[in-house]
Image (cartoon, coloured by chain):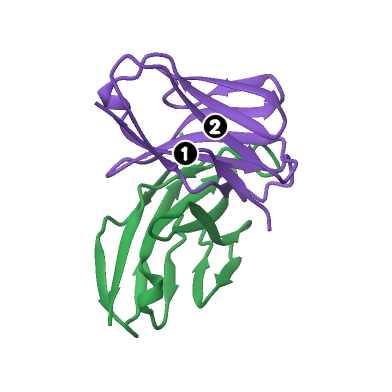
Amino acid sequence: DVKVTQSSRYLVKRTGEKVFLECVQDMDHENMFWYRQDPGLGLRLIYFSYDVKMKEKGDIPEGYSVSREKKERFSLILESASTNQTSMYLCASSQTGGGTGELFFGEGSRLTVL
Amino acid sequence: GNSVTQMEGPVTLSEEAFLTINCTYTATGYPSLFWYVQYPGEGLQLLLKATKADDKGSNKGFEATYRKETTSFHLEKGSVQVSDSAVYFCALNPTQGGSEKLVFGKGTKLTVNP
C-alpha cells in the first residue's frame, strides 16, 4: 500500500523553539509538498520540492524552511516557533508530469505552539 | 489568477438524502479539476477527477461534471450515508501536464445523521 508518513501526529512546543516536521514517502515520487490547514482558510501551500535539494516557495513560506536531502524525505523546519504557527500540517507527494494532479497525503501533524 | 470557490458549510443531511456541494473556479487555460475528501483524523485522499470539459468523474457513488461554460464542478451523490461524513475539497491543477501544484477551495464539512 502506497504511503506518505508524517513522523509526529501531535506536537506541543514553546514559543521560540526550533521544530522539525518529517515526512517520508515510499512511492519514489519526485514532487513533495508541505501545506498547512486552518479552519476557514482551507489548505495553503508552504513549500514545494520537485527534486532532491530543489525547493520552491509556496503561498506562505514566511517563518518556514525546508530540507530535501533524499528523494523520499521532505522536512519542514520552523526556526523559531510562534503561536500563529499553531496549525495542522499536511505533507503530500506526487509523480512528475501527466497532469493527473493526484496528490497523496499523509495523516497530518497537529502542532500547538504555547 | 487561479482560484476555487466552494460552498461554505457546514452541511448537515439525513441518511439517504441527496447531496450537492457547489464548486466554481477561475483559471486561465484548461485546468484539471478534482474533489478530495478528508475523513475525520485522516489526510486528504482523491475522490474523483476530470481533465477536460464535459468529462464526468465518479467514485463511491459521487459524481461531478466538468462544465466549462459555467466554470463549475459540482459534487453530487444521490443517497448519502453516515460514512460519507467528512470534509470535501474542490481543487484545480492549472497546468495540464505540468507540476502538480493544486489550488484548493476552503473545504465543505458534511455531517450525515442516521
Q: Amino acid at mark 2?
A: Glu
Q: Are marks 2 and 1 on the same chain?
A: yes
Left or right position of A91 against A27:
left
Q: Are marks 2 and 1 in contact (CB under 8 Å)?
A: yes
Rendered shade, chain A: purple
Left or right position of A100 against B74:
right
Which chain's colour is green?
A: B
Q: Position of residue A65 (x, y in %)?
A: 50, 18
Residue at 54% over, 42% down: B102
Q: Quadrant of residue A60?
A: top left
Q: Amino acid at mark 1?
A: Ser
Residue corresponding to mark 2: A22
Q: Position of residue B106 (x, y in %)?
A: 35, 47
Task: Looking at the picture, tell me which residue is in the foreground, A90 or B8.
Answer: A90
Quadrant assignment for the C terminus of chain A? top left
Neighbour tally class for label 1: few under 14, some 14-19, many 20 plus, Cα within 10 Å: some
Q: Quadrant of residue B29?
A: top right
Q: Calculate the distance from the C-alpha at mark 2 to the C-alpha at mark 1.
A: 8 Å
Residue at 68% over, 54% down: A2
Considering only order in the chain, which callout, 1 or 2, is on the residue closer to the N terminus?
1
Chain of the residue on which disc 1 is drawn: A
Task: Looking at the picture, tell me which residue is in the foreground, B43 or B49.
Answer: B43
Image disc number at residue A8:
1
Question: Count the marks: how many?
Answer: 2
